[in-house]
Amino acid sequence: MSRTEPDLLYSEEEEALRAAVRDLLTDHCDPAGVIARAESDTPHDRALWKSLAEAMGLAGLLVPEELGGQGASHREVAVVLEELGRSVAPVPYLASAVVATEALLECGDRELLGRLASGRTVGVLAVGLHLAPGDALPAVRLEDGRLHGEVTGVADAAAADVLLVPAQDGGLYAVEADAVTVTPQTSLDLTRPLATVTLTGAEGRRLGDTEPAVRRALRSAAGLLTSEQLGLADWALTETVRYLKERKQFNRPVGGFQALKHRLAQLWLEVVSLRAAARAAADALTTGEDTDLTVAVAQSYAGPVAVHAAEEALQLHGGIGMTWEHPVHLCLKRAKADSIAHGTSGAHRAAVAGLVDLQAP
Amino acid sequence: MSVDAAELRRRTAELLATHPPASTDRLEFLRARFDAGLAWVHYPEGLGGLGAPRSLQAVVDAELEAAGAPDNDPRRIGIGLGMAAPTILKYGTDEQKQRFLRPLWTGEEVWCQLFSEPGAGSDLAALGTRAVREEGSGDWVVDGQKVWTSSAHLARWAILIARTDPDLPKHAGITYFLCDMTDPGVEVRPLRQITGEAEFNEVFLTGVRIPDDRRLGEVGDGWRVAQTTLNNERVAIGGMRLPREGGMIAPVARTWRERPELRTHDLHQRLLKLWVEAEVSRLTAERLRQQLVAGQPGPEGAGMKLAFARLNQEISGLEVELRGPEGLLYDDWTMRRPELVDFTGRDAGYRYLRSKGNSIEGGTSEVLLNIVAERVLGLPAEPRTDKDVAWKDLAR
């Protein structure tokens, strides 16, 4: 084993960060509030974003201190995403603090990086949420220095102050949100709503080349999404175990039936395995060692586990799990959407095949 | 002051200087290594260790390997190292520790485990092998039958649990012994298994006499003592440290690369899924190891064996299928008594059949799921109808 193994634990600082984020979410992101907001005109929780991004400074974790950020790493971002996943928090953290920020870091745009790091500006990369790191990139037309076209399935576009738009000249352009039309799409995951972004002669500022910026952004997104999926799965398991200890049928706690115990134990094993995979991905993104494979492994594993956890949570909650009132559907919808976001499990497995030379027939 | 890596390097260098591996007899070297406290550095001084952090063993092992020093062939003495030793260390008298640990570690004395019985598998505490104390001599006389005993035909000693009081409920009437396998009352018969070979044995115990000073722990405390053994067994089975693409996935990945004519789209999807799961399982084991090193042992250990068993079975099953017409063949059904068992050895058919045992040996997967559900998740325990019943009155 010449490779050094990734650091798969949480440091004390990371645990302290987790505790702080969880405290905030416990106080300001309760399931009833998230459910009520989901169908309102403001699906994103701007007050919560302000607390997380501005007050706690979490939007700038990936940005170096000299550019106005915290100079932290993907490992800390992963911990934040675990907690946001647990709460299915309706904030554009992954979109702005990870995807857009990574693209800007690649382009080296100090001005926008500073704005995003402060949390006062939300940036969104205008590509479909389903896009995998290796997929062909969409691009809008560039005519006489103006951008024309339409991109659909853009997550959190409705919350964006600035959009990063790939254009046909191979450049990535910054476009202020008031220069485009954002049309919400009815989304499976109400807490990370998609929208169509329409550009009709919008003015843009060229930031740099699209290809490396978007590749970097999507690889980080795919790797760190596993931590959000871990948070979802961990919540689903914890909440289901808690409920089944409490819920009594046939004069016994339902959690005492062996058929259910075995399903939960199996799920626990999947969740602890996902934790190792997610930590490996966060660490690999931080160190830059073995990153492509570690991210592909983690993301191909994470999707089915988070979905399985949410589906088990729903089934084992019985009828209450089918109600709009109970938060398990928030978890299920996010988990299912995440299984497509930034590349399906199958897309990442195909990447693994190439990386470890297990070629298709 | 606790011993650090630099000190261990110094002591290892000293051992190598006083006992140059090239010119020192293997056994002599191993004994000297034990006496220098470099056998298992986390053991106490005088018992092969230096009371150092367990994680520093790697420092010693690396130095010795680089110097071409002989090792104690740990695969051959796994039961002694992994199960008997930690139990003796925890519950043994000073005399027992002094007598047994050194030849156990050097491999001069091989150990086996006399736990399972034909009537006591998952319900191990129901075991019926009797140990009766003889008046006068104070010796214990043991009668019964044990099964699934690997290395019994090679072993000098056995860890044994037997019933000393049938009038108590089953967990309370058990005592733990160290049994001399050369006693005339011990008969070892090979037990042939589905692979064709006999890596296990049945052991018949007839009037086997065990002096009281070979009892480990208190009379009636054998169940508690056995937990140390069993917990270590599960760690040993599920917790092996592997490189990426190590273990069962290695041969099938190799076959895939070398035999493109065997590839199909269906097999490709399944192989990739298993490759990823094997890698994640490896990372999970690595995380568990890092937690142990950091002094924060997690409950993941109970789950590692579950994953290990399922993956071995699915991967080896896939490999038989991948081989197509060759998958219809088997390398050799000859009855043998192998000294070493390699789950990933021989051909795909053997690996497929042998891995079926991985979800049975060392705690069935079903029992392990119960353990995870109850001890890790805190779900209600199975209803117990046997807890307050004298062992002799249990249904059988």
Image (spheres, coloured by chain):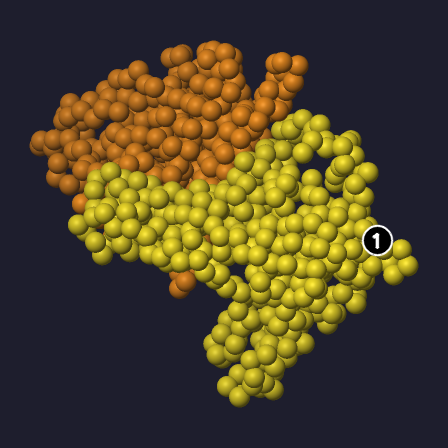
Chain colours: A orange, B yellow
Residue in the image at 62% along x and 24% along y: A256
- Horizontally, residue B346 falls left or right of residue A309, namely left
Query: In the image shown, does A144 or A226 lie closer to the viewer?
Result: A226
Furthest toward the bottom, the residue is B23
Q: Is residue A239 visible?
A: no
Which quadrant does the C terminus of chain A fall into? top left
Residue B308 pos. (x, y %):
47, 46
Q: Residue A17 appears in which quarter of the rendering?
A: top right
Helix, strand or loop under label 1: strand
Query: In the image shown, does A280 or B237 lie closer to the viewer?
Result: B237
Residue at numbered disc 1: B133
Residue in the image at 40% along x and 12% along y: A39
Residue A60 pos. (x, y %):
42, 40
Query: In the image shown, does A21 or B6 lie closer to the viewer?
Result: B6
Q: Is residue A233 above or below residue B230?
A: above
Q: Amino acid at mark 1?
A: Arg
Number of marks drawn: 1
Residue in the image at 51% along x and 15% along y: A318
Furthest toward the right, the residue is B136
Residue A69 pos. (x, y %):
43, 43
- Horizontally, residue A108 falls left or right of residue A74, namely left
